[in-house]
Image (cartoon, rainbow, N blue to C red):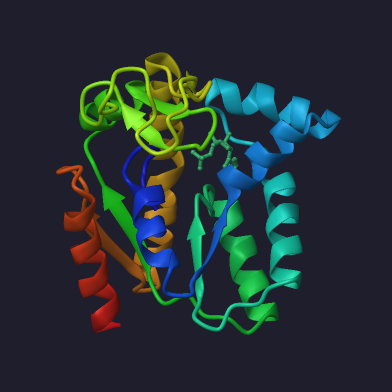
Amino acid sequence: MGAPGSGKGTQIQMMLNEGYKQISTGDILRNEVNSGSDLGKHLKEIMDSGKLVSDDLVIKVIENIFNNLESKKGILLDGFPRTINQAKKLDELLKKHNINIDAVIEINTPDKIIIDRISGRFVCVNCGATYHKTAKKTVEKGICDLCKGTKFKTRADDTEKVVKNRLNTYHKEANSIIKYYKEKGLYKKVDGSSGIPENTDKQVRDILKRL
Ligand code: AMP
């Protein structure tokens, strides 16, 4: 768990080469938007405003993935569950597939740091490399370090106004989800405020080692 911009995506990237399977509902929904389908058009409106997509739709997406699941090492759920209803549905699904949750890790980062972080993000259109207007500039102005591409874009939901909406949405739902997993003894918190991926990674690894 973690608010948008807390460093969840980066942390997951750092764990992927160890054989975990990532399930990121945000990425799956964005793929649908990019496909240009009618459903995608409907989703784009909701996502661009920073609101949540309906539980029914997200649960259907997750159900589909669980039915076709192959991962020996384990699954990293990213961006799901986002509501208490989704958390309860997830429990049903896990039971059906005989899977246990090992830990629910929240990357905790103050909102102000997140707003500065996200509202400066931009990505290379060609290869998807991510940059930041102050914290991670391209080495040569206007040229992607990785592929030398010269076109960049920002995510439509990365503007300050939308980021604030997304943070409000996160906090509104997160408190009850955290309570739910605290009661099950699964909730763990790490500090993501440094913005240094290795710092967060070390804390996550320490938790995994102790499981
Ligand atoms: P993310 O990349 O995880 O920040 O997700 C981007 C957007 O996709 C969110 O602002 C929501 O509109 C939507 N979304 C992603 N995951 C969920 C979810 N589990 N439930 C509802 N909406 C979601």
Question: Which residue is rendered at x = 39% and y = 53% of the image?
Answer: 1
**Does residue 37 appear to the left or right of 20 in the view shown?**
right
Q: Is residue 22 above or below residue 20?
A: above
- Name above or below for residue 92 compared with residue 114: below
In the displayed orientation, state which residue is furthest to the right.
Answer: 38
Q: Nearer the viewer, residue 91 or 98?
A: 98
State ligand 1's quadrant: top right
- Tell me what residue is drawn at x 24 percent, y 61 percent: 201
Residue 50, position as x, y percentages in the image: 52, 26
Comparing 198 with 144, the one in front is 144
The quadrant where residue 143 appears:
top left
Quarter of the image where one finds residue 30: top right
Which x, y percent locates residue 129? 43, 37
User: On the image, which quarter does residue 198 sit in?
Assistant: bottom left
Residue 116 at x, y percent in the picture: 25, 24
Give how far across and how far down residue 4 sits, in percent. 40, 38
Q: Quarter holding the C terminus?
A: bottom left
The residue at 37%/41% (across/down) is 3
Q: Compared with residue 172, is residue 158 higher up or lower down, i.e. above or below?
A: above
Instruction: Give the answer, above or below, for where 18 lies relative to 148.
Output: below
**Which residue is at 77% across, 35% downward?**
35
| Residue 127 vs residue 204, the one in the foreground | 127
How many marks on residues? 0
